[in-house]
Amino acid sequence: MHASEGVGISPAHILNDPIASPDTETQSRDSSPPGALRKLVLRLHFYAGIFVAPFLVIATVSGGLYAIAPTLEQFVYRDYLHVESTGPAAPVSEQVAAAQAERPDLTVSAVRPSDGSGQTTRVLFSDPTLGEGERLAVFVDPVAAKPVGELVAYGSSGALPMRTWISQLHRHLHLGEAGRVYSELAASWLWVIALGGVYLWVSRFRAARPRGASAASRLSASAAPRLSASAAPRLWTLGGGTRGRNRALGWHGAIGLWLVLGLVFLSATGLTWSKYAGENVSNLRASLGWTTPSLSKELTGDDAVPAAGGTQVLDTNVGRVDDVLATAATTGVTGPVEASIPSNADTAFTVTQIREPFQFSPDSVAIDGATGQITDTSRFADWPLAAKLTSWGIGLHMGILFGLANQIALLALAVALLVVIVLGYVMWWRRRPTRGPRRWGRPPARGALRSLRPVTVAAIVIGSLLVGWFVPLLGLTLLGFMAVDMILGVLQRGRASTGVSN
């Protein structure tokens, strides 16, 4: 979701831009190598903001909705998720059998037993008519062992239709694999725009503060916008006037500075789900041994039963579910869990702690249903650090790790980001000329790269190539921005040679 697009959308970001504020002292500062680097970042910040911001807006809105979807789900589907019956729950095997009687045309694959009074049990079926990652969930009253309804559930999180629809909107705009380009593009540029905006904002205040001012005072000043009572009514007026633009700049930069850590986090975790950069992340983790350990479900050894399958084996295993859950509980795998129900005699049951609020260390265990023997375990404590961080990051990104507080924080982040984006466009509009043929805000001055030292240019080129290779859409669109900039430069020189004003 996500995105601090706003941190880098506006060309008017910088008050000491040679175009926006052409005083002699500022021009002298900008001619130095640090000033040249700042102008280069400003130009990149401007083009990335203008072209990428629309993608970020969509990702931000859909991501904000997805953040609160788990809570909305509890209200929208309360008749499926909750029952009013009280008393001891029927054996899980009976609940599964009741669901099977409701859908005899499908094959049961797993069960998520009720984890508390008033909650339903979710029995999951494989359905060849559903899409990838989707299963049919039959909700069962655990006390009466009676189905109360059925819905399609998606993924390991068990998202129900509303949350799934929002998730797919956020992920690919309901356009399939082709639509994933939009979300990857937004995630690829988000961290660049955010960090670029912080660099521009902090460097502006460093240059503006007195030389004797401490670093702490400069940082404190950069984190709060400069406001004035006279500027207040001009903020949302799209007419001219520097006070209104300066006030918008103050809010744009200060809010973006506060958001930057959250935006970089959303960008990094979002890229792990992307198509092109995500594959590179997966390959890197595999090469370094940072992948999440897998749980073996294959039964081997002298006690292994010859391969077999079918209705008889499945029915037998349904009857073993309660014993399997009890065995898993002795190993500490308790709470909200999902137990797979194998239909082959040479496949073990698996019991896995599902992703829930404040579930920081999900464990899983494989159990031979015929003997009750534990055949494999996966302890979160034994995972590589990178796998742990990935698990926590996914839960945090999805608004699950810290429950409602997590969701509210993500929603607030999305709203604040939209404000930053709008302020960026307000500043861009205010910068437009009031006379002449030009109708749009002037971009920052070009030529900064030529002012840098050769070693700095080499470092920028090498760094851009490496980042562009690892994050392909970032590299391709960066080349696109360079092409647009070169074309605009040619057109500008052509107009200048014919005497047409810029």
Image (cartoon, rainbow, N blue to C red):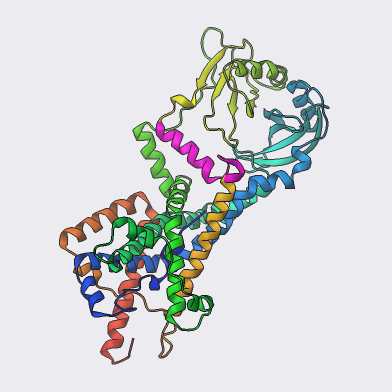
Residue 357 x/y as whole percent: 59, 37
Q: Is residue 457 left or right of residue 42?
A: left
Does residue 418 appear to the left or right of 106 in the view shown?
Answer: left
Measured as percent of width and height from the top left, residue 10 is found at: 42, 70
**43 left or right of 355 in image:** left
Q: Looking at the image, which is closer to me, 286 or 140? A: 140
Whether residue 428 is visible to the viewer of this picture, yes or no, is no
Residue 416, visible in the rendered structure = yes
Instruction: Specify start and end residues of the magenta stretch as a single range.
Output: 385-405
In this view, 365 is above or below 82: above
Q: Residue at x 24, y 62 (%)?
A: 212
**Number of marks in the rendered image:** 0
Name of the residue lying farthest toward the top: 302
Q: From this viewpoint, which residue is outermost toward the left? A: 454
Name the residue nearer the viewer: 128 or 477. Answer: 477
x 62%, y 49%: residue = 68
Identify the image quadrant of residue 169.
bottom right
Residue farthest to the bottom, as pictured: 499
The vertical placement of 64 against 320, above or below, is below
Q: Position of residue 470 (x, y in %)?
A: 35, 49
Image height of 475 relative to 136, above or below:
below
Q: Quadrant of the C terminus?
A: bottom left
Q: Residue at x 32, y 78 (%)?
A: 21
Q: Is residue 278 above or below residue 9?
A: above
Q: Is residue 398 magenta?
A: yes
Q: Is 321 contained in the magenta span? A: no
Query: Residue placed at 40% from the left, 90% from the top?
Result: 436
**Residue 90 percent across, percent down from the top left:** 79, 22
Q: Residue 361 versus residue 285: which sits nearer the camera?
A: 361
